[in-house]
Image (cartoon, grey):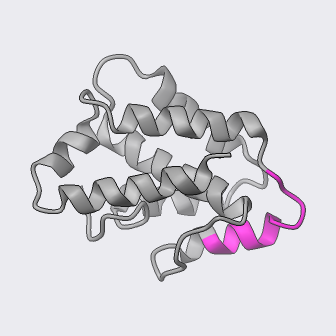
Amino acid sequence: MGTWAVDAFGNDYAQDWAEDLHETSNMDAVEDTLNTVLDASGELEAPFAAEALVAIEVLARLQGKGGPSTEDSAAIDEWVAARKPKAKPRADLADKAVRALDRILSADSELRQLWEESEHYSDWQAAVADLRARVSV
């Protein structure tokens, strides 16, 4: 996995997902991504978890609770800015987001396992905790 930062945007999976989001105009991609994580049985594969973190960032930003805007978040920030005045995420998506975060942080999450093996595990945990605080209603 090409990773360069502990935030949701700092990996190849997130960047690819953000590019694909630009092909949609509604929240279907966000909901589908969360459902993939929630419906996964057995070990949650890292790509799905990384994509879900970006989907959750979309929700947080639409709620006006976005994290820092960076070069890595630019594609998402642009998509959100074009829809924010019109789009308000449904409350059930925020609930799904919190449940997806629980799954991503669980012992059977490959992404968590990969971060546990790195020296930046506590930084990643803090970034995910910050995202949870921003998306919770």
Which residue, as the protein is rendered here, is positioned at the far top? 41
Q: At x 57% / y 40%, what residue is drawn?
A: 97
Q: Is residue 107 above or below residue 88?
A: above
**Residue visible at 42% across and 34% down in the picture:** 102
Write the start and end of the magenta stretch as one range: 77-88
Q: Is residue 84 above or below residue 30?
A: below
In the displayed structure image, the side of residue 3 where residue 33 appears, left or right:
right
> Going by the image, does 44 lie left or right of 73?
left
The residue under the point 50% across, 50% down is 132
From the viewer's perspective, is residue 98 above or below residue 18?
above
The image shows a total of numbered marks equal to 0
- Where is residue 4? Give x, y as percent: 26, 70
Quadrant (top left/top right/bottom left/bottom right) for the N terminus:
bottom left
Residue 80: within the magenta? Answer: yes
Q: Position of residue 81 (x, y in %)?
A: 75, 73
Residue 11, image x and y in percent?
Answer: 34, 62
Which of the 4 image quadrants contains residue 94?
Answer: top right
Q: What's the residue at 30%, 42% (across, down)?
A: 46
* Image quadrant assignment for residue 79: bottom right
* Residue 81 drawn in magenta: yes
Quick check: 25 left or right of 129? right
- Work out whether 72 lies above or below 23: below
Q: Position of residue 133 (x, y in %)?
A: 53, 53
* Nearest to the observer: residue 23 or residue 76: 76
Residue at the far bottom: name it.
Answer: 71
